[in-house]
Amino acid sequence: MEKQLRDRLVFLYGEDQADLLTSRLWEQIALFRAQHPDLTAVPSPQRISEKDAILITYGDMVQQPGQKPLAALAEFLPRWLNGRISAIHLLPFFPYSSDDGFSVIDYKQVNPAWGDWDDVAAIGRSFRLMFDAVVNHISAESDWFQAFLRDERPYTDYFITADPDTDLSAVFRPRSSPLLTPFETPSGVKYVWTTFSEDQVDLNYANPDILFAVLDVLLFYAA
C-alpha cells in the first residue's frame, strides 16, 4: 500500500517531493485512525456494487411543513423505500452560493436550511450513504477563497491563476462564461481559473497542500 501511494505521489508531484509527501500522508492517516479507533475498512461483500439499487437525491426533495427537508427525507426513505433501495446518494447538501449546491461554501457544514449532520446520520442508519465530493472547485464565498482575496498564506496558492493573454482556446468546456475571472487582491488583479462559473473557483492540485486539505475533508466524511 505504501509503495502504491508513493508511486501516485511521484506521478503527481515528482520524485523530489515523494518521500516527504508520503510521510505526511501516513501521518495524516495515522492521526485519523487514532482519533477514530472504532472505524474499520468496509468488508468487500458490504461495499456498493452493481447489485445495489441507489437513489440519487437532493437533500431538499421531500418537504414536510414544520420540518427541515433532511429530517423529512430521513423519515420518508425507510417508510417507503426500505428493502427496495440499498444506498442513498446525497447530492451536495452543504451551504452553497450557486449551481444547485455545486458551489460549496463550507465542506464540513450542512446547509442549515435543510437540516444538520444528525439528519444525515439518521438516513445512514437505514441505508448506506454516498456523498457528492465537490472537490474540483469551491465557492468564491468560501473562507478559503476569501483568504486568497486578502493575500493570506497559505491560501494564495490554493487556486490557479494565469496570464489573461495565455492562449486557452484548446480548453473545451460546456460553458459560455470566461475561463479566467479577474479578482481584485491587495497585490493587484489576479486572473483565476473558473471552469464552471465565476462563482466556482478551481482548486490548485499542483499545490500538495490542497491535496491534504481535501483529504482532510474526505476523512471527515468517512468518520
Image (cartoon, rainbow, N blue to C red):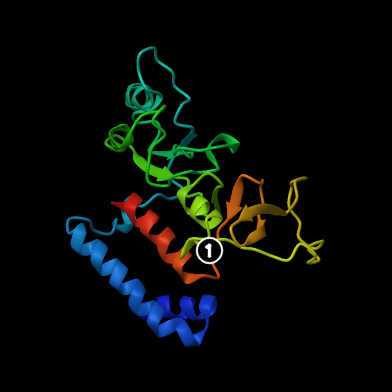
Q: Residue 208 vs residue 77: left or right? A: right
Q: Label 1, on which residue?
A: 156
Which residue sits at x=36%, y=52%?
Answer: 47
The residue lying toward the viewer, choosing from 120 and 56, is 120
Q: Measuring from the top left, give residue 153's x and y in whole percent.
A: 46, 64
Name the residue type under label 1: Thr
Which residue sits at x=66%, y=46%?
Answer: 198
Which residue sits at x=49%, y=32%?
Answer: 58
Q: Quadrant of residue 217?
A: bottom left
Badge 1 crowding class, 10 Å Cα cut-off, few under 14, some 14 to 19, many 20 or more, is some
Q: Is residue 194 visible?
A: no
Q: Measuring from the top left, give residue 123's x and y in whole percent.
A: 32, 33
The image shows residue 11, relative to residue 65, as above or below, that is below
Circle 1 — which element?
A: helix
Which residue sits at x=26%, y=62%?
Answer: 32
How many marks the image carries: the answer is 1
The residue lying toward the viewer, choosing from 220 and 141, is 141
Q: Quadrant of the N terminus?
A: bottom left
The residue lying toward the viewer, choosing from 20 and 49, is 20
Identity of the residue furthest to the top in this view: 65
The residue lying toward the viewer, choosing from 38 and 94, is 94
The image shows residue 64, relative to residue 51, as above or below, that is above
Q: Measuring from the top left, give residue 77's x and y in whole percent.
A: 37, 26
Q: Is residue 40 visible?
A: yes
Q: Measuring from the top left, give residue 164's x and y in whole percent.
A: 76, 62
Q: Residue 200 vs residue 42: left or right? A: right
